Image (spheres, rainbow, N blue to C red):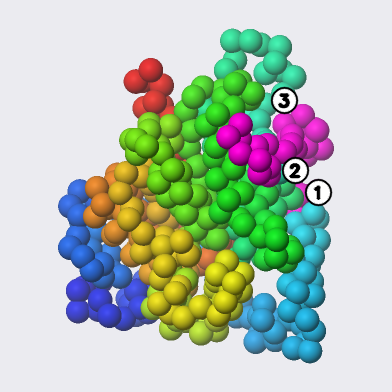
Amino acid sequence: MIHRHMRFMSTKSAFAANAASHGHGRIWIYRPVNAPTLPFPSTLSSLQGLSSVQMCPLPKKTASMAPEKRLYNLFPSGQRPADSLLKIHNLKADFYREQFNQRVPKNDADARIEKRSVGSTRGLREVDVTIYFPEAKNSTEENETSILDGICLHVHGGGWLWGDSCHQVAHRCLEMARRLNVAVVSVDYSLLCADNASFNPVADVVTALKWIEDNGATELGTDQAFVASGESSGAHLLLLAMLHRRDERKHESRLQSLWRCLNLVYGVYDLSGTPSVSHDSETSSPLCGNELLWLYDLYCKRVANKDCSQSDRKNPYLSPLYADLSALPPALVTVGTADPLLDDSLLLASKYNAYGNDLEVVVIEDGEHGIGHFGVQENETAGNLARDYTIRFMNRYLEKHHRLT
């Protein structure tokens, strides 16, 4: 366990100093019962209520990446930034299309996946989404008694620069739809490689939120029970969108009654750079601290339309860690100890709990960025256990809704 005298060092460094050397790692599961005192130390000791420790083989590590392979070094510095960003996006898009063709059976692609544009009845903005069903759409329509248990809003990762609601995440969204018996609505928010006028990813996620609240259950044939899930930059956008919806509403409790829980997976919550990000340099793979700071610079400059100081980056509209986190749905925060974003997750968890929200935390020893979702640790034992826990967490809150209605 990490002691309080380590509170000013990166938690990632502290875990590395105490890593298991016997080939078996630990998965810590916290259900905090006592809110810590502000300010929030980046240590697990601030989260009271350790529920269990599971043992499993340590996941294998991603091979160290050469500096020239890092995102900010992929293309010559003489190129226009917009050209470089588009090339990075296109490289990733080609990979995801090939992944989709390999992992998604054609019958699932034809029968369980639907593309459409959605917009709230209260606004003019529209956004593209991909909708995933637990079984073939026609079979659901023929059986009128087969109402789905709810809707899961999904927000993909990709550093606000790459990724999409279909090719990148289809295999995972199909799994969630089947195991939760819900319609999964994954949103195609605007990316950094888009033109300046259209870049507003938080507004895009808010549009999807509103559509689900207003029309989703009726149009998709589901129960009025909603959960939401986001990974990495998607967790960042999801939390900002939830804060926006909470502040829009006259009665904050309404948000908690509609949205049963949030699944926040290795997210970004402080764009000024937490210690585990700023101290990482080029140590970690598949994503290192310097790459994250580079992406933070791009995002902040586009959103604020200026070069942002450290103080600017702590504005709650950029960094949800500094927001008022009251009156939010129950949340699960998941992260690995080898992820540069470890401190982001632990600091957010402490603050989320301190504001009186229900919270669970899962920390995976030696888990890298992407564990359970992509990369070499996607289907390692630890990755499968972590992903399974997120499914069971969301299912628990869906079942609780059904018991109360």
Whole-number angstrom distance, CA of label 3 to CA of label 2: 14 Å
Number of marks present in the image shown: 3
Q: Is residue 330 something one can see in this rendering? A: no
The residue lying toward the viewer, choosing from 83 and 31, is: 83
Kindly indicate the quadrant of the structure image that contains residue 159: bottom right
The disc, 3 or 1, on the residue closer to the chain's N-terminal end is: 1
Q: Which residues are magenta?
A: 99-127
The N terminus is located in which quarter? bottom left
Q: Which residue is mark 3?
A: 136
The residue under label 2 is 104
**Residue at 68% from the left image edge and 49% from the top image edge:** 188
Residue 238 left/right relative to 73: left
Q: Residue at x 28, y 59 (%)?
A: 350
Is 111 part of what is drawn in magenta? yes
Location of the C terminus by quadrant is top left
- Asked whether the residues under the numbered discs 2 and 1 touch, taking CB atoms below 8 Å apart as contact, a structural biologist would say yes
Task: Tell me the SS state at disc 2.
Answer: loop
Q: CA distance from mark 2 to mark 1?
A: 6 Å
Taking the image as shown, residue 339 lies to the left or right of residue 38, namely: right
Q: CA distance from mark 3 to mark 1?
A: 18 Å
